[in-house]
Image (cartoon, rainbow, N blue to C red):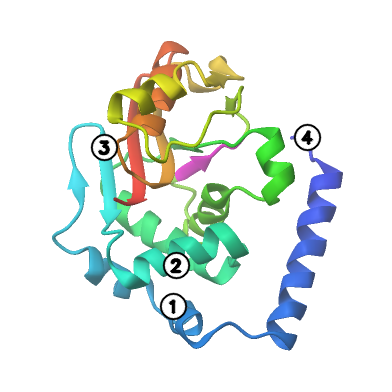
Amino acid sequence: MKIDIARLFIDTTTTALEGFLLLVAPSAPGIRAIEHMAPDDFAIIGCGTPRTSDDVIALLPYKNRSVKTALIELKTHRNRRVANILGAVLFDGLKSRADSGTIIIPIPITRAKRVERGWNQCELVLGGLKKVDRTGMFEVRTDILVKIRETPDQVGKSRAERFENLRDSFAVRSPAAIAGRSVIVFDDILTTGATLGEARRALLAAGARAVICVALAH
């Protein structure tokens, strides 16, 4: 397995810096409360509210204040404590819905967006999932699906415009890795489903046997 030394160094350095910042600038009280929530607390929030169909699953209601705050904190502040909790929530929500050996692929961001923001929040959540997946039930892959072009912001667009905006924006780098395999494609928030739907289309076209779209919240 090829190791990206530069990225490993950056991630290690960033983790140390984040730990230092927590000491000198602790989280706000509302965030601290979320950081001490258990995965079961989120499961209770989501009880009875998941959106589930044959190929789309969303576990939590975005309108819930704790869920919304947690996802914003993850996306804007790279909060790894929150990522670990949400990763455990995701694992618990999927372990009875997927077969062992299923590949999980996060919705990717472009290279320019990664440089601008510094991280992909979906990858952070899957890092949390891996920590609780002690038997290796899922195979997390961040090197298969790539976003090949920047797309304009989806805010304010109609459902049809959102789908058109994302058309052909994803590509599969390693078709052999998913050929005949079951795949879960994961995003943090489900709105119209345009992003997950386009990713699913690309993965099926590349040879995946089945693709389930999963989001933490909707």
Tell me: residue 137, above or below residue 1. Answer: below
Gap between marks 2 and 1, in whole Å? Answer: 7 Å
x and y, in percent, of residue 164 in the image: 39, 19
In this rendering, the label closer to the viewer, 3 or 2? 2
Gap between marks 4 and 2, in whole Å? Answer: 33 Å
Question: The residue under label 2 is which amino acid type?
Answer: Ala
The residue at which mark 4 appears reads as: 2
Question: The residue under label 1 is which amino acid type?
Answer: Ile
x and y, in percent, of residue 78 in the image: 61, 62
Residue contact at pointers 3 and 1, CB within 8 angstroms: no
What element does badge 2 sit on?
A: helix
Would you say 132 lies left or right of 23 here? left
Look at the image and give the residue range highlighted in magenta: 138-142
Gap between marks 4 and 3, in whole Å? Answer: 33 Å
* Label annotation for residue 56: 3
The residue at which mark 1 appears reads as: 34
Magenta stretch, overall SS: strand
N-term-proximal mark, 3 vs 2: 3
Q: Residues within 10 Å of mark 2 (few under 14, many from 20)?
A: many
Gap between marks 1 and 4, in whole Å? Answer: 36 Å
N-term-proximal mark, 4 vs 3: 4
Gap between marks 3 and 2, in whole Å? Answer: 22 Å
Q: Is residue 130 visible?
A: yes
Q: Residues within 10 Å of mark 1 (few under 14, many from 20)?
A: some
The residue at which mark 2 appears reads as: 70
N-term-proximal mark, 3 vs 1: 1
Tell me: residue 63, above or below residue 34. Answer: above
What element does badge 3 sit on?
A: strand
